[in-house]
Image (tube, helix red, strand yellow):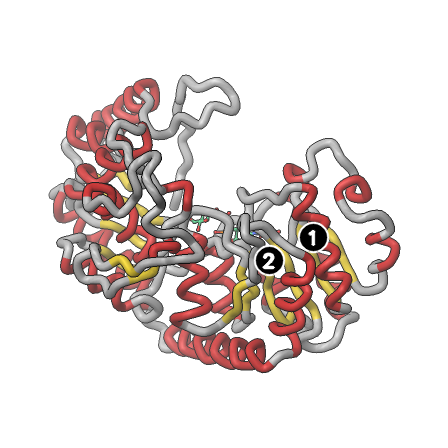
């Protein structure tokens, strides 16, 4: 049974200072201490997000282990804990000096022990730093140090999908456990479920492109226009999630090209939140245009749906690399020189995925991976469940907790 306790964080609404916060530190310690006093349900460990290194100090004060949970995959975790090392190798140009590498002119990085060389552009612009005093670099240094003190790292992935990254973690001494895929909690607006499914029921097999950018990434109005025009030009049916927070106070006609809704009303459905897993498992869905968030990537693989990749930031480039180059379960939308969306590229990508040779191959590979996932589930011994149990047993042993305290 899971019981949820809400702790005081001392933050103003909208303040996301998760990384270091003394109120949270004290609240968490007081909570653990209180539970320990009561004895019956004393915590065995702290399971912490890597980006909250302050939880290590709380765990040490409470005398319990800290374990990390990585909501993304093993490769992303590996990159995270090696970034400071990459910075110190000088792979990022000094301010003012000519760029050593760019997206257009990538170089191969071979600095991560245990990992084959990978293309530099997998590391997005937002994490390319050359200044050791930058707050992000300082945070990373703390993350790396805490990671070394973590008993285990639970990763929301499966080893069969990324054996090399798990191997590299092992080589680097990280005790990584694959515990994915973990189910995602539903969201309130799933009341659109009946509408979505009934609309999909009226569409042909594999004829619909589903478009969603997860819960964080947003598109500018210009990008919305390019995406909409590309969809229109493709002539394909589409289901498009435009979150309320991505349109603010504006109504749909204000953020989409003039007349777009009217012209596409017979073949398009726009909603503010979809029952994504149900949508992906529907026979009518032929492809998923996605930002490549890890959960979306995983869900698409589990349902055998090929992807049209449009990564935005963070681990999404790594996920896109897996999709397009390792598993071959999708294709990437071409970008403009400045990295933006362009209608003709969107149109070409949608057509290629739904009707082209590349799309057919991607679907075939996605279905092959889906079959592997389903098979291992059927065998009843889901590796991840076994790993979670093993982790739990280990933590209990570490804390010397018996069943009858
Ligand atoms: O209309 C929608 C849109 C999304 N989802 C669900 O929301 C989740 C979205 O997760 P994900 O694809 O991982 O995207 P984000 O929510 O943006 O995830 C953040 O966290 C991920 C895990 O760390 C990272 O991989 C991403 O880069 C980061 O943006 C998935 O389970 C979807 O099924 C819905 O149910 N309905």
Q: Which mark is residue 276?
A: 2
Depth check: give the residue in front, 325 or 194. Answer: 325
Q: Determine contact: label 1, label 2, CB under 8 Å.
A: no
Find residue 226 and name its label: 1
Left or right of 248 in this view: 85: left
The residue tagged with tag 2: helix, strand or loop? helix
Position of 330 compared to 193: left or right? left
**Above or below, comparing residue 10 to residue 267 in the picture:** above
Please report whichever mark, 1 or 2, sits nearer to the chain's N-terminal start. 1
Q: Residue at x 54, y 52 (%)?
A: 337
Q: Is mark 2 within 8 Å of ligand 1?
A: yes
> Which label sits on residue 405?
none
Q: Note whether residue 396 is visible.
A: yes
Is residue 363 toward the left or the right of residue 54 in the image?
right
Q: Is residue 25 above or below residue 45?
A: above
Assign a secondary structure to mark 1: helix
Q: Position of residue 20 (x, y in %)?
A: 31, 25
Residue lying at 37% horizontally and 58% vertically, measured from the top left? 106
Residue at 72% from the left image edge and 63% from the top image edge: 238
Residue at the (18%, 62%) spot, across then down: 114
Q: Residues within 10 Å of mark 1 (few under 14, many from 20)?
A: many
> Badge 2: few (under 14), some or many (20 or more) residues near its Cα, within 10 Å?
many
**Placement of 103 over or under 301, stated as above or below:** above
Q: Quadrant of residue 159?
A: bottom left
- Please state the horizontal and vertical placement of residue 50, each as a whole percent of the image: 30, 41
Mark 1–mark 2 distance (CA, rounded to whole Å): 23 Å
Residue 207 in picture, x, y percent from top left: 70, 73
Q: Nearer the viewer, residue 162 or 357?
A: 357
């Amino acid at each position: 049974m899971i019981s949820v306790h809400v702790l005081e964080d001392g933050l103003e609404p909208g303040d996301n200072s998760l990384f270091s916060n003394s109120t949270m530190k004290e609240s968490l310690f007081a909570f653990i201490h209180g539970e320990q006093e009561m004895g019956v349900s004393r915590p065995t460990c702290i399971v912490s997000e890597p980006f909250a290194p302050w939880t290590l100090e709380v765990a040490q004060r409470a005398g319990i282990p800290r374990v990390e949970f990585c909501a993304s995959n093993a490769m992303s975790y590996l990159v995270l804990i090696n970034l400071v090392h990459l910075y110190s190798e000088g792979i990022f140009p000094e301010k003012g000096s000519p760029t050593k590498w760019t997206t257009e002119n990538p170089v191969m990085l071979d600095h991560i022990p245990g990992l084959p060389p990978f293309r530099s552009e997998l590391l997005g612009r937002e994490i390319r730093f050359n200044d050791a005093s930058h707050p992000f670099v300082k945070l990373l240094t703390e993350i790396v140090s805490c990671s070394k003190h973590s008993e285990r790292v639970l990763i929301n992935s499966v080893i069969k999908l990324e054996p090399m990254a798990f191997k590299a973690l092992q080589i680097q001494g990280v005790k990584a456990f694959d515990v994915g895929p973990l189910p995602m909690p539903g969201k309130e607006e799933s009341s659109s479920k009946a509408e979505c499914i009934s609309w999909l029921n009226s569409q042909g097999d594999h004829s619909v492109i589903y478009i969603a950018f997860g819960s964080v990434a947003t598109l500018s109005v210009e990008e919305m226009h390019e995406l909409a025009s590309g969809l229109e030009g493709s002539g394909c049916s589409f289901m498009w999630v435009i979150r309320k927070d991505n349109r603010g106070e504006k109504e749909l006609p204000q953020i989409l090209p003039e007349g777009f809704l009217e012209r596409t009303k017979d073949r398009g459905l726009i909603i503010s939140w979809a029952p994504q897993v149900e949508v992906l498992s529907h026979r009518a869905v032929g492809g998923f245009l996605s930002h490549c968030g890890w959960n979306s990537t995983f869900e698409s693989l589990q349902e055998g749906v090929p992807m049209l990749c449009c990564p935005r930031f963070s681990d999404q480039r790594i996920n896109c690399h897996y999709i397009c180059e390792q598993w071959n379960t999708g294709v990437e939308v071409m970008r403009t020189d400045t990295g933006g969306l362009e209608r003709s590229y969107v149109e070409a990508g949608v057509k290629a995925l739904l009707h082209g040779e590349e799309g057919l191959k991607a679907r075939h590979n996605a279905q092959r991976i889906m079959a592997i996932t389903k098979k291992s589930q059927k065998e009843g011994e889901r590796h991840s469940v076994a790993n979670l149990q093993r982790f739990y047993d280990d933590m209990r042993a570490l804390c010397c907790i018996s069943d009858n305290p």
